[in-house]
Amino acid sequence: MADILLITGLSGAGRSGAAGVLEDLGWYVIDNLPTSLVDTIVELVSKPSSDIDKLALVAGRQHVELLPKVAALRAGGHRVRLLFLDASAGALVKRYDATRRKHPLDGEAAGLVEAIELEREMLQPVRNAADLVIDTTELNVHQLKSKLVAAFDQAGEQHRLQIAVESFGFKHGLPIDADIVMDVRFLPNPHWDEHLRPLTGHDPAVRDFVLERAESSDFLDRFGDLLLAVLPAYESEGKFYLTIAVGCTGGRHRSVAVAEELAERIRAKGFAVAVSHRDIAR
């Protein structure tokens, strides 16, 4: 039986780009598929004569009708995951300005921003039901590829909870695709040390400054234990992906060091973990 991935999200958020990455990863991809044809395609792929074992379907304009399809396919015994691509209104406006294309809901709203927000409202139930949400606001094509590879190219881990640990800076905004957000601004800030300020949480000097303190060790022990207690519950509930966001002020020092350490602790317990640092280069 094929592994089925349904890709949806806001127009301009990167659905076609994601399709290209998945095709490179060996998925059989059908782009801009009418929702009414999902059942037919899955039926064909599920036949014994089919050699397709990984099927990615990029929903067309009818993606608001996906949820009943997902429920029906799962009830029929298929393994189905739903990927939702999101982005801020500002980022989407820039992308539409660059491509000079019309928004699909252009005729139903007073302008581009209104069309974007109308679509966001329409798709909110789909976003809420998604197994994985990726915010592409700050992602270039290479960063998007890294996230997709981490989520969908995990050899031997396809039936386990896959965890993403992401550092970020609060002054640059909350990551909208996070399931759990932890604020580590209570830890001493290397920014105020002129020798450490140019460095990042990857550098041993910053890492030691942040982690080799009693409050840091106590926090990591307690937070790590909490996560390790709840992760099996997420897994048993059938959740495929979990994003844990760790934030400090700028996203370059404390959050990076803590995210790396936290990922190592979770990975040591046998979970698949990918680490990324959204604001480290700012």
Image (cartoon, rainbow, N blue to C red):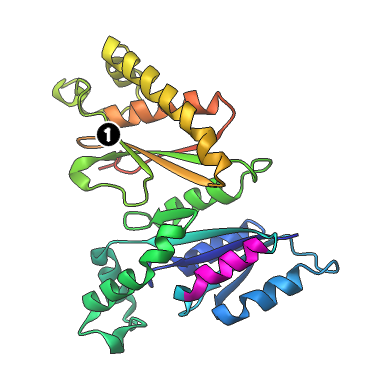
Q: Does 41 appear above or below 232?
A: below
Q: Is residue 221 above or below residue 166?
A: above
For image coordinates 68% across by 60% down, the residue present is 78
Q: Position of residue 178 (x, y in %)?
A: 36, 46
Residue drawn where x is 33% and y is 14% of the image: 218
Name the quadrant containing residue 38: bottom right
Along the viewing direction, whichever of 44 and 282 lies nearer the viewer: 44
Q: Tell me the kind of residue under disc 1.
A: Arg
**Going 34% across and 26% down the picture, which residue do you hit?**
257
**Residue 73 counted in the magenta span:** yes
Q: Secondary structure at mark 1?
A: loop
Q: Is residue 161 visible?
A: no
Q: Quadrant of the C terminus?
A: top left
Q: Is residue 235 left or right of residue 140?
A: right
Using the rendered image of the protein, determine whether residue 56 is visible from the camera's viewpoint. yes
Residue 128 lies left or right of residue 248; in this view the side is right
224 relative to 127, above or below: above
Main SS class of the magenta portion in the image = helix
Q: Residue 123 appears at what percent x and percent y?
A: 38, 69
The residue where tag 1 is placed is: 252
For disc 1, the neighbor class at 10 Å (few under 14, some 14 to 19, many from 20) is many
Residue 74: x %, y % from top left? 63, 61
The quarter of the rendered structure image containing the N terminus is bottom right
Q: From the viewer's perspective, is residue 102 above or below residue 47?
A: below
Which residue: 29% across, 21% down? 206
Q: Does 136 lie within the magenta span?
A: no
The image quadrant of residue 61 is bottom left
Give the extent of the magenta segment: 65-75
Farthest residue, direction front: 75
**Residue 191 percent across, percent down from the top left:** 18, 26
